[in-house]
Image: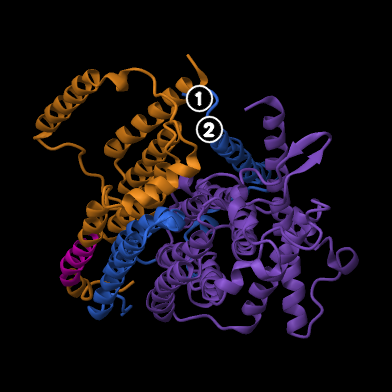
Chain colours: A blue, B orange, C purple
């Protein structure tokens, strides 16, 4: 399973790089924790709101618009991912295969057009 | 045990623990983040199975898109953020029974598949060719062209459906807090 | 996998990470100098010759600053957020080839950690989609209305532009028939081979979407100092604040370097075949040029209003990116 597959070779770099990245990020935080002064007081630790007392809960309800955008994003993301292998294989494809890819893109575009016309892309 | 097996067990353990925490965590945002960790674990498992395309797609689609959608959904739900509700309702044992049944079924089926029990053999082709093979197969008449095109239609239907469902909520939301 | 390989990787990983940290420090100085010049000022010039020690002074100052964690914050996630923000910015460059193979101490060394990964382009997409989390978590865990607002805005903005970014990748893939960045770079030998000539629209889409992904001006709505008091990092101070900035500047470097790799011929330039060591130098020059363009844009352009920013992403960049894919496909079909 591990053996000589160059496949894993390609990915082990992430196993190296990730810890180094984490260390690079953690060291300054720890250093600052050790070296920096710590004199907390209640006012300092209160939520910053330009000097005004915080009113109400932070987690007010947000616009549903955010959710709609995320929904549209999920669908287009899935569609976009399908295009990548198609593009890789492009020079080996016959004409009808290319056209199928284009059809796929057109259906994607039709979806975008629909969303647009429905006004879901307006940020009101 | 080979190194790969040790990595496999470690990653599987992380994935399973994270999945348990998804349902056990009382804070919904925390639950969503545990879900991200367990999805990442699955991505690593794909790498171990030499399916690098699937691994990356798992990260792009599941972590990069669907989990974000879930987090937005949590943030949109008023007062869910801080409130701690009991984790189970009185039907919990039905769920537990169904989960157990599913688990047993999976184990039985996996045991009957001969290749699943033995170790995964090396894939015969270099990776580069696999990707273009995948690309070709997606649009090949002898391959998966029908599922490919149906998938795009399905996604279009999902898009329209989600908009139809999400639109009326917007009208209600406008009376509430603007953010 | 063997021992020399592992040593090579470890050294290269450390060099790249340290390089990115130093790059961050000096990019801030570079930016301040250029902004000052554009605004007819001198810019930092006190610490060391030409202000060259300014980033060091800033760093030392930040380490000795008190760090606050607000009482109402989700403490663990609050501390974790800067780390989650920085790590993707550091690891995204792993798949970018930095130069041709060369002999060092009798070893055949590949510059760049994993330029040969067959899904390199998708790796970049995957890492950039993880980058959203640091910002979303920072905004949420601060338990501050401005921060949450900024975090949400940033998240929505980043996912919106990610689509255009992803589709801009498809152009070079269509031309090179590979997601392997080494293949893409090798397909662009010679000035006329650069994909920017074949993909001018793709290049512009990539650069604009990249700047939006990094939340730089004119797309720096999530930070909007004047209305959101710095957005998702409103509650951050000291080193954690610096890490948030480090992520932003390292992402700038990454976007520039990836743009140079995909569209400007990567490390190829005159005499690279004779002297491989020139490869990284060319790549660096191209990267610095693109960084200059980004800073120039910041000095020139004003911030978009949020609704226009979202409209630009969805109604201009995304359709253009789709058109670009189809046009490229047709051109490749007819021409090649």
Q: Which residues are magenta?
A: B155-168
Residue beneath disc 1? A2
Chain of the residue under label 2:
A
Residue B161 shown in magenta: yes
Q: Main secondary structure of the magenta part?
A: helix
On residue C285, the disc is: none
The N terminus of chain C lies in quadrant: top right
Q: Residues within 10 Å of mark 1 (few under 14, many from 20)?
A: some
Q: Is C173 left or right of B54, judged from the image as shown?
A: right
On the image, the x and y values in percent for residue C44 come to: 80, 71
Disc 2 and disc 1 in contact, CB within 8 angstroms:
yes
Query: Vertical placement of C236 versus B19: above or below?
Result: below
Count up the numbered dots.
Answer: 2
Under circle 1, the secondary element is loop
Marking on residue A8: 2
Q: Is residue C70 visible?
A: no
Residue C251 shows in this picture:
yes
Residue positioned 71% across, 65% down in the render = C190
Label 2, label 1: how far apart the Cα atoms are: 7 Å
Q: Position of residue A47 (x, y in %)?
A: 47, 60
Q: Position of residue C164 (x, y in %)?
A: 44, 68
Q: Secondary structure at mark 2?
A: helix
Residue A15 falls left or right of residue C25: left
């Amino acid at each position: 399973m591990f053996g000589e597959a160059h496949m894993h070779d390609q990915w082990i770099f992430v196993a190296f790089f990730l810890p180094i990245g984490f260390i690079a990020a953690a060291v300054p935080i720890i250093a600052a924790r050790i070296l920096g002064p710590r004199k907390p007081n209640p006012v300092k630790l209160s939520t910053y709101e330009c000097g005004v007392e915080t009113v109400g809960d932070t987690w007010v309800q947000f616009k549903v618009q955010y959710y709609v955008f995320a929904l549209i994003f999920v669908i287009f993301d899935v569609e976009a991912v399908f295009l990548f292998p198609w593009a890789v294989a492009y020079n080996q494809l016959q004409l009808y295969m290319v056209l199928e890819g284009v059809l796929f893109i057109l259906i994607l575009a039709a979806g975008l057009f629909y969303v647009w016309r429905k006004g879901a892309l307006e940020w009101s | 045990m080979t190194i790969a097996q040790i990595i496999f067990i470690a990653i599987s353990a992380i994935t399973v623990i994270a999945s348990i925490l998804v349902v056990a965590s009382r804070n919904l945002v925390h639950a969503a983040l545990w879900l991200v960790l367990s999805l990442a674990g699955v991505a690593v498992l794909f790498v171990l199975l030499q399916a690098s395309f699937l691994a990356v797609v798992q990260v792009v689609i599941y972590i990069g898109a669907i989990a974000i959608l879930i987090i937005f959904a949590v943030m949109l739900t008023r007062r869910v953020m801080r409130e701690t509700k009991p984790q189970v309702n009185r039907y919990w044992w039905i769920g537990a029974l169904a989960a157990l049944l599913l688990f047993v079924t999976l184990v039985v089926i996996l045991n009957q598949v001969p290749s699943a029990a033995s170790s995964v053999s090396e894939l015969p082709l270099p990776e580069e060719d696999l990707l273009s093979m995948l690309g070709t197969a997606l649009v090949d008449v002898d391959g998966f062209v029908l599922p490919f095109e149906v998938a795009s239609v399905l996604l279009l239907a999902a898009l329209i459906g989600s908009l139809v469902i999400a639109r009326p909520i917007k009208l209600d939301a406008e009376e509430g807090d603007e953010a | 996998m063997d021992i020399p390989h592992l040593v090579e990787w470890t050294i290269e990983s450390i060099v790249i990470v340290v390089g990115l940290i130093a790059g961050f420090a000096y990019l801030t100085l570079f930016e301040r100098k250029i902004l000052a010049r554009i605004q007819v000022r001198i810019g930092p010039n006190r610490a060391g010759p030409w202000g060259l020690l300014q980033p060091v002074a800033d760093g030392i100052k930040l380490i000795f600053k008190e760090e606050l964690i607000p009482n109402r914050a989700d403490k663990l996630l609050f501390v974790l957020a800067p780390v989650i923000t920085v790590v993707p910015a550091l690891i995204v460059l792993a798949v970018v080839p930095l130069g041709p193979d060369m002999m060092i101490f009798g070893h055949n060394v590949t510059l760049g950690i994993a330029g040969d990964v067959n899904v390199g382009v998708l790796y970049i997409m995957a890492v950039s989609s993880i980058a959203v989390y640091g910002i979303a978590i920072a905004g949420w865990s601060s338990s501050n209305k401005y921060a949450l607002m900024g975090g949400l805005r940033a998240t929505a903005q980043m996912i919106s532009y990610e689509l255009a970014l992803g589709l801009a990748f498809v152009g070079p893939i269509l031309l090179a028939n590979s997601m392997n960045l080494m293949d893409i770079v090798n397909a662009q030998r010679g000035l006329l081979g650069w994909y920017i000539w074949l993909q001018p629209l793709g290049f512009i889409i990539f650069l604009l979407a990249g700047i939006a992904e990094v939340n730089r001006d004119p797309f720096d709505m999530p930070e909007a100092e004047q209305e959101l008091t710095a957005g998702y990092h409103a509650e951050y101070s000291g080193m954690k604040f610096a890490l948030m900035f480090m992520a932003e500047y390292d992402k700038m470097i990454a976007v520039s370097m990836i743009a140079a790799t995909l569209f400007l011929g990567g490390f190829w330039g005159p005499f690279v075949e004779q002297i491989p060591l020139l490869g990284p130098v060319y790549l660096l020059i191209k990267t610095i040029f693109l960084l200059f363009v980004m800073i120039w844009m910041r000095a020139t352009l004003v911030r978009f209003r949020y609704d226009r920013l979202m409209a630009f992403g969805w109604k201009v960049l995304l359709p253009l990116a789709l058109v670009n894919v189809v046009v490229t496909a047709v051109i490749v079909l007819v021409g090649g």
